[in-house]
Image (cartoon, rainbow, N blue to C red):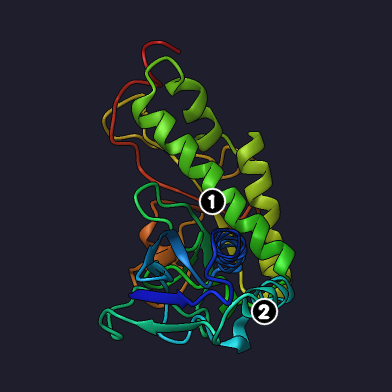
Amino acid sequence: MLCEYTFVPRDAGDAGRRELEDWAGALLARLRNNGQLWGRAVVGWVDGTLRATFHVPTADALDDAHASRGVAGTAKQVRALCAEPPAWRIVGDETDTDAGDATGAPALVLKADVFRETSPVREGRAGTPVPLFRLPIGWDVRENLVVWMRRAQLHEELWIQSGRLESAAYRELSEPDSPLATEGRELARAVEDVTGIATYYFLRHFWGRRVEDARDVCPACRAPWATESLGSTPAGIDGFTYRCDPCRLVSEAATATRAEPADA
């Protein structure tokens, strides 16, 4: 859903406006790293007021109750530069949200979406992104999850569009011991340690050696993939073709028949 945040400068001069713009930008970055803001913000001056428009996962995402220490400290600096308390309001449909909830989920999945910057932590039944402020994890883990998500999105874009870098990017996305996967799996373990919910890491699997790709064993431990259902619905965690419970990995059936891109 769409949200607008407005800031009225205490000092309407150029220096005052620049200082407020810098601190407001820092606040938006903090909110983004805490999972309270999804994606990029559009910021500009309108009739002497600084306005920022962006997406939030829930109607109460910007409530003080969800603020990290960094968000609260930066918000205090912003308020000191404003003639009146900064105000935010939902300008889109308050019921228009794709946010998930980890409560009662059989599992969580760490998976970035190259097309949308939401949350890298997915609810295990429907696969919806869970706002990071809804998870009882530390602010540092939240920030690291957002940083990892951006890095994973960049690798997805390189794989899709880069040509010569396609093979290297695909290896980062598909191999369980790549630097990207190693970092992601460590973050998944951190989420599981705090929530007590099994948290899996998604491995990309696009290139197969034949049309009906078997990928018989887990690429991390070489044991057979799990065959029993996890959870009670066919969505979410059960929607992945492959799953290894000891390694906390899920993957997909290949949709292309070559082992990897031709320039590998």
Q: Residue at x 40, y 10 (%)?
A: 263
* Frontmost residue, 222 versus 248: 248
Report the residue marked by disc 1: 149
Q: Quick check: 5 left or right of 103?
A: left
Q: Residue at x 54, y 64 (%)?
A: 13
Give the mark nearer the N terminus: 1 vs 2: 2
- 203 lies above or below 188: above
Query: Is there any visible trace of residue 74 in the rendered image?
Result: yes
* Frontmost residue, 249 versus 2: 2
Residue 95 x/y as whole percent = 28, 85
For residue 11, the mark is: none
Identity of the amino acid at label 1?
Answer: Met
Residue 56 x/y as whole percent = 42, 73
Q: Residue at x 62, y 57 (%)?
A: 145
Q: CA distance from mark 1 to mark 2?
A: 33 Å
* Frontmost residue, 2 versus 199: 2
| Mark 1 neighbour class, 10 Å CA radius: few under 14, some 14 to 19, many 20 or more | many
SS of the residue under disc 1? helix
Report the residue marked by disc 2: 80
| Mark 2 neighbour class, 10 Å CA radius: few under 14, some 14 to 19, many 20 or more | few
Query: In which quadrant of the rendered image does the C terminus lie?
Result: top left
User: In terms of image quadrants, where is residue 255?
Assistant: top left
- 221 lies above or below 228: above
Query: In which quadrant of the rendered image does the N terminus lie?
Result: bottom left
Mark whose residue sits in front, 1 or 2: 2
Residue 101 x/y as whole percent = 47, 80
